[in-house]
Image (cartoon, rainbow, N blue to C red):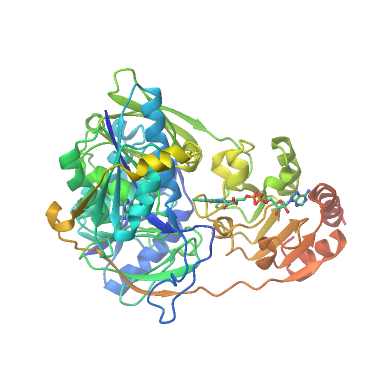
Amino acid sequence: MSVLILAEQKKGKLVKASLGVMNIGATIASKMGTDYNVLLIGEGAKDAAAAAVNSGAGKVFVAEGDKVATYMDELWADITLDVANTAGATVVLGLATTQGKAVMPRVAAKLDAGMASEITGVTDDLHFIRPVYAGNLNAEVEITTEKKVATVRGTAFEPIAEGAAAAIEDVAIAADPAGYNKAFVKLEETVSDRPPLTEAAVVVSGGRGLKAAENYKIVEELADLLGGAVGATRATVDAGWIHNDYQVGQTGKIVAPDLYIAVGLSGAIQHLAGMKDSKVIVAINKDEEAPIFSVADYGLVADLFEVVPDLVQKVKAAKQG
Amino acid sequence: MKILVMCKQVPDPDIKVKLNADGTGINTDGMKFVVNPFDEIANEEALRIHEKNGGAEVVVLGIGPKDITTQIRSCLAMGSNRGIHVVTDDVIDPDNVARIIQKVMDDEKPDLVLIGKQAVDDDSGQAGQILSALTGYPQACYASEIVLDDGKTKATVTREIDGGLETIDVNFPAIITADLRLNEPRYASLPNIMKAKRKEIKALSLDDLGFTPSPKVKLISLTAPPERQAGVIVKTVDELVDKLINEAKVI
Ligand SMILES: Cc1cc2nc3c(=O)[nH]c(=O)nc-3n(C[C@H](O)[C@H](O)[C@H](O)COP(=O)(O)OP(=O)(O)OC[C@H]3O[C@@H](n4cnc5c(N)ncnc54)[C@H](O)[C@@H]3O)c2cc1C
Ligand SMILES: Nc1ncnc2c1ncn2[C@@H]1O[C@H](COP(=O)(O)O)[C@@H](O)[C@H]1O
C-alpha cells in the first residue's frame, strides 16, 4: 500500500504543478499511514528529479533512456503501471495537464481502478472533491475500487514543503515504444518569453472585443509590464488570433493567479470556469451587463482601446514614481 | 470503412445548472438537453471523412435513458447513417461507458472511433483513453486535425497539447478524441431532418450486450461552491490603478 505520483518535467525542469500533486499525495499517504513515491519519465527526468527529491517522498523513480526519447501516452502509462505495481501503489495521482489527462485514464483502466478527474480536495475517508458542470457544482465522489486514480487540478494545492531527501531509483523500462501502432511525426512548440499561463502570478486575457489578432499587442504590453502571462477565450482561439495554448476555461487551462485582468471578454460560463478562483479579478468591458462583472473585484465599463493603453501608461508611471 | 461516433446527452452548456431541492442531483425542470458539443464535432468529422475519403459508414452510439433518442436523431440529421442506442437508466461512469463501447465494437468492428475529449456535464475526459487501453488500439487525444492516408490504413492527427501542437500517426483501428478546433459542425438541413426520422436506431439493453454495470465511481453529494461576489465599478483608470496598488496590493 502506497501512493505514487506521476510528476512531469520538460527538458529537465520539473513542471511546477508536480509539487502541488506531491503535497496532496503526501496528505493522502499520511491519512493511509503509508508513504508516497514520485515517478519522472523522459529525457531530463534525472535532472528534474533534483527539484522533487527534498520533499519527504520515499523514492523518486526515474525512467530515462532511448526508449523514452520521444513522448507517447501509451508508453508513459505502461511505465507508470509497472512502477505502480512494483511499488504496491493503491493510489496513483497525475497532473491535470494535457499529458496527465491523456495518460491517467489508461493507468486506471489497466489497474482496474476508478478514476476522479481534476480533483480539488480530499476528505478523511478518501473521497475526492471535484468540480463538475463547468465548475458550477462540486461533486464528492467515492472511488469504490481498492485502487484509486486521480488527476489533480494545479491551482488547488500549494507546493509541498521541503522535507527529507528521497532515494533516487532508476526504472528499467520493459515496454517497447514500437509496439503501440502509433508514431511521432512532429512537435510545434509555442515559444514565449512570458511565464507559463498556469504558473504566472498575473494573467491578462483578451477576448473578442480586441477585434483583430494584431490587437493582442494591447494586452501583451500590459502583461509584460506586470510580468504576467497572456490568456485568451475560445472565441479568439477559434478565430485564429492566438494559439490554442492560451485558452483559459472549462475546456482550456485553469488558472488562479494573484491578479487576472479580463479585457474585452464577456465572461461566458465556460470562461469563468477557468479563472474564477483568481485572487483579484479586474474586468474591462464596454458592456456593463457583461457577466464578467459579476465575478470582478474591480470593473471598468469602458472602451478597451482607450483605457488599456492609458492603464499601461499609468502603471508605468506609478512603478517609476 | 466504418466510423463509430459517440453521442452523449448533456444539459445545454450555456445554461447555468442548479442543484435540486434535496441536493442529490441537478434541477432538470424545463431544462434543455443537447448533444455533447465535443460529440457533435466528432460526428461532423466522421461525415467529413466520408465526404473527403471516398465514403464511410458512420454509426452513432448513445448510452442512456429512453429520451436520448432525440440527440441520436440530431446526429443522424447531420448525415450519419444509423444509430445504436444502449438503453439504460443506470448512472454509467466513464469506465463503464468505455466497456459498453467495447462491447458494441466487438460486433460492429469499426476502423475508427471518434469520441469527444470530454462530456461537458461530468467533465471527466476519460472514456476515450480507457477505451484505448481496454482495446489496445492507439489513442490520439485532443485532435484539431485528422488526415487519412490514401489506403485508409492510418490517420495523421494534430493534437492540441500544453505547449503547442503535436502531430502523430495512428494505425487503424484507432481511437481519436475530438477537440474544439477540429471543425465547426454543420446545421442539419430540413430534408436531412426528415430523412433522419426514417433512419434506423437499434435499441439494445445492457443484457443484450451481456454487460452488468459496475460503476467504479459513486457520487456521494453535489454542492454549490461559494459564489464569488461582484466588487466595485471604478469610474476611471486612475481609480483602478489606485485600488490595485493601495487596496488589492497586487501591483
Ligand atoms: C463545449 C464548449 C466549451 C467551451 N470552452 C471554452 C473555454 O474553455 N474557454 C472560453 O473562454 N470559452 C469557451 N467556450 C466558449 C464560450 O461559451 C464563449 O463563447 C466565449 O468564451 C466567448 O468569448 P469572448 O468573451 O471573447 O467573446 P464574446 O462573448 O463575444 O465577448 C466579447 C466581449 O467584448 C466586449 N467588447 C467588445 N468591444 C469592446 C471594446 N471596444 N471595449 C471593451 N469591451 C468590448 C463585448 O461587450 C463583449 O462582452 C466554450 C463553449 C462550448 C460550447
Ligand atoms: N452516455 C454516453 N453515451 C455516449 N457516449 C458517451 C457517454 N458518456 C461519455 N461518452 C463519450 O465519452 C466522451 C468522454 O466522456 P467523459 O469521459 O465522461 O468526459 C464523451 O465526449 C462522449 O463522446
Please identify the quadrant where the C terminus of chain A is shown.
Answer: bottom right
Up-down relation of residue B135 to residue A264 (above or below): above
Q: Residue A197 location in percent, x, y?
A: 58, 49
Q: Which quarter of the figure has residue B88?
A: bottom left
Residue drawn at 31 percent across, 68 percent down: A29
Up-down relation of residue A68 to residue B220 (above or below): above
Residue drawn at 20 percent across, 65 percent down: A146
- Between residue A143 and residue A166, name the one nearer to us: A143
Up-down relation of residue A201 to residue B82 (above or below): below
Q: Is residue A296 left or right of residue B19?
A: right
Up-down relation of residue A267 to residue A81 (above or below): below
Q: Would you say residue A79 is visible in this rendering?
A: no
Q: Residue A7 location in percent, x, y?
A: 38, 51
Q: Residue B42 location in percent, x, y?
A: 39, 40
- Between residue B48 and residue A280, name the one nearer to us: B48
Please identify the quadrant where the N terminus of chain A is shown.
Answer: bottom left
- Between residue B96 and residue A314, name the one nearer to us: B96
Q: Residue A212 location in percent, x, y?
A: 71, 38
Q: Which quarter of the figure has residue A31?
A: bottom left
* Count of numbered tags: 0
Q: Would you say residue B71 is visible in this rendering?
A: yes
Which residue appears farthest toward the top when viewing the image? B150
Q: Is residue A255 left or right of residue B75?
A: right
Q: Is residue A35 left or right of residue B162?
A: left
